[in-house]
Image: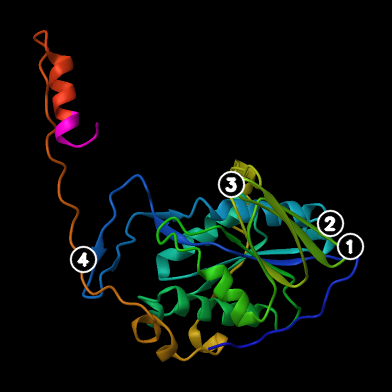
Amino acid sequence: MNRAWKAASKTVEETLKIVVLVKHVPDAQFDRHLSGEHNTTDRAESILSELDEYALEAALQLAEARGGEAAGNQVIALTMGPAAAVNAVKKALQIGAFSGVHLSDDALAGSDAAATSLALAAAVRHLGAEAPVDLVLTGMASTDGETSLVPAQLAERLGLPQVTFAATLDVAEGRITARRDGDAHSDTIEAPLPAVVSVTDQINEPRYPNFKGIMAAKKKKVATLSLADVGVDAAEVGHSGSLTVVESAEARPPRTAGTIITDEGDAGIQLVDFLAAQKLL
């Protein structure tokens, strides 16, 4: 479903309303597991996706350059997921986000990238109902799925310009300017606001939450929205609304013991023979 959404273009150095997508993902320190009949990711040990911190930092820098929250700028951390996913928003608030939104509904369970982008687009439209959203920022990918599909799909559903994998980001006179770095060259891209931008881990150095930020986060608002609040039918998301499905999954086989070579004066020959047998020579 493609639902176009438009907002008024910005001019000169006005305040910005920025929505930053943050995701609750399995902690990379622990082994990952699938669970349930639909083979969905077990998120028991989860944290804020590290790559989303770069998007949050970019948003905070843009807002602070324009006077911060006191001047009317907004940096809203938005997540989608079960009850525990609110922890991603809370971490974003500790880092510096001004407010948070948690889209939570049982029907969202099992949503693939297409269903996720549909739900998030509806949430962004909801947040822009009273005052337009100027910029939607995301990380270059989530550290669990790593598909990088959602930013582009989100831009399409909102009918907004998209810039992906931005290594730099500037906003001036109602336009964004970003640099995308390739292996052998870089491109500079411009687009009018409002827009959707995904940023790489080269764009900045994310700040850490300090004691002041942690205490201040306790006073910040986290609004909880349901699918009904944002106008999405349950059949459009979750397993029923997804375009992809995991038909089967099995645990990765344990690593086998390697070949041990004991040096009795011929270790070099044994090593060459082994590499030759593996067709590595």
Give the residue drawn at x 58%, y 82%.
122
Q: Say which amino acid is labelled 3.
A: Asp
Which stretch did the figure color magenta? 275-281
Q: Are marks 1 and 2 in contact (CB under 8 Å)?
A: yes
N-terminal-most mark, 1 or 4: 1
Residue 13 bears which disc, if any? 1
Q: Position of residue 221 (x, y in %)?
A: 61, 66
Q: Residue 52 at x, y = what percent?
A: 55, 56
Residue mark closest to the camera, 1 vs 3: 3
Judge from the rendering whether residue 80 lies leftward or rightward of residue 176; answer left or right. Answer: left
Identity, as a three-letter code, of the amino acid under mark 4:
Ala
Camera-near label (2 vs 3) is 3
CA gap between label 2 and label 3 equals 34 Å
The earlier-in-sequence mark between 2 and 3 is 2
Which of the two residues, 228 or 194, is positioned nearer the viewer here? Answer: 194
User: Is residue 153 found left or right of 248 in the rendered image?
Assistant: right
- Name which residue lies at 48% across and 55% down: 48
Which residue reaches farthest right? 12
Q: Which disc, if any, is residue 183?
A: 3
Q: Which amino acid type is marked by label 1?
A: Glu
Report the Cα–Cα distance between label 1 and label 4: 51 Å
Q: Which mark is residue 126?
A: none
